[in-house]
Image: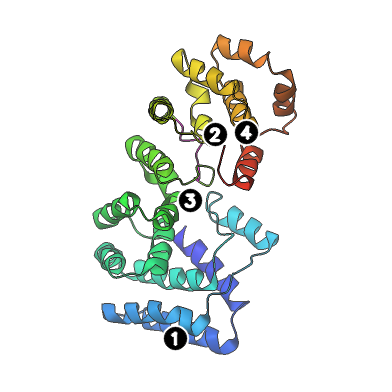
Amino acid sequence: MAVIVREQLENWLITRLSADNWQWLQSRLTLHCKPFAARDLFVSLGLVPRKLGRAELNLTDSELDQFQRTSNHRWDVSEWTVETTARLLILSQVAEQDQAAFGPLFTDLCRNADLTESITLYRGIALYPHSTELDAQIGEGLRTNIRAVFEAIAHGNPYPCENFDQNRWNHMVLKALFIDSTLAPIQGLDERANAELARILCDYAHERWAANRSVTPELWRCVGPFATADMVDDLHRVAKSSITVERNAALLALSQCADPVAGELLRQSSCEVGAIARGELTWRTLHTVHQATGNNP
């Protein structure tokens, strides 16, 4: 995948950079095609925003579609900048040149990175060769309370869905809730949902309710397919909410639930059930409404 993605990054940049800027970037890429001192990489990455700027890529629908077809449909690059793209182009080439050395180098880069650099480094993890050092550093990124760094791993990134075991996946989803991040941008959220995660999230919801705190409606997305007994009771409770986005989230979750009680509860909300059947009420539309209301249920 790394080679295909690198070709795409080059194509995007060559059409957006001036001839002089593209020539400068090519000179740095050439430098990193042969043995180099680590400080050369630090210099290259540090110079990117000054030499190339931080403009949005503003990828066209055609470019996004092509990228999804040829690389990985789980990778959301719609908000990438010239700075992000150029840095990842350099990093992916360095990783390809010496895969064994890249893990320790990545760790060193993360330790010395500013916030913007950290975000870029973690956004590119799907491009890098697997190693124990890389895995350990990803763990550091997940443990941070800096939401932007956490989201560089968790949001729009194919790596967690494709590489995390169930335990790490579940903890990432729960951590997103703890730091008031959103779940919808997590790639493979429905695919990686599991019964253990459903139970963890219901326990989390009970803790929030006991403290008289709200529960984000999108939490129930990971519960519905696995809800039984008391979890169905939790969905019933939310389905009776006077807040539309909460009620709709519970009904969406119940529509994915195989428990017979779920069907009985859905029959009490024929209007919303009809909207679900017609594809008018989905987790995507609910997320859009939730975002528009400032993440307040």
Q: Is residue 36 visible?
A: no
Q: Is residue 110 above or below residue 25?
A: above
Q: CA distance from mark 4 to mark 3?
A: 22 Å
Residue mark closest to the camera, 1 vs 4: 4
Whether tag 3 and tag 2 are in contact, CB under 8 A, the answer is: no
Secondary structure of the residue carrying numbered label 4: helix
Task: Assign the magenta stretch its main secondary structure.
Answer: loop
Q: For the point 44% across and 43% down, which residue is it?
A: 161
Q: CA distance from mark 1 to mark 3?
A: 32 Å
Residue to which mark 3 is pinned: 155
Quadrant location of residue 289?
top right
* Residue holding disc 1: 27
For label 2, the residue is 217
In percent of width and height, residue 296 lies at 56, 41
Q: Is residue 261 left or right of residue 178?
A: right
Q: Secondary structure at mark 3?
A: loop
The quadrant where residue 124 appears:
bottom left
Q: Which of the pair 8/44 is nearer the observer?
A: 44
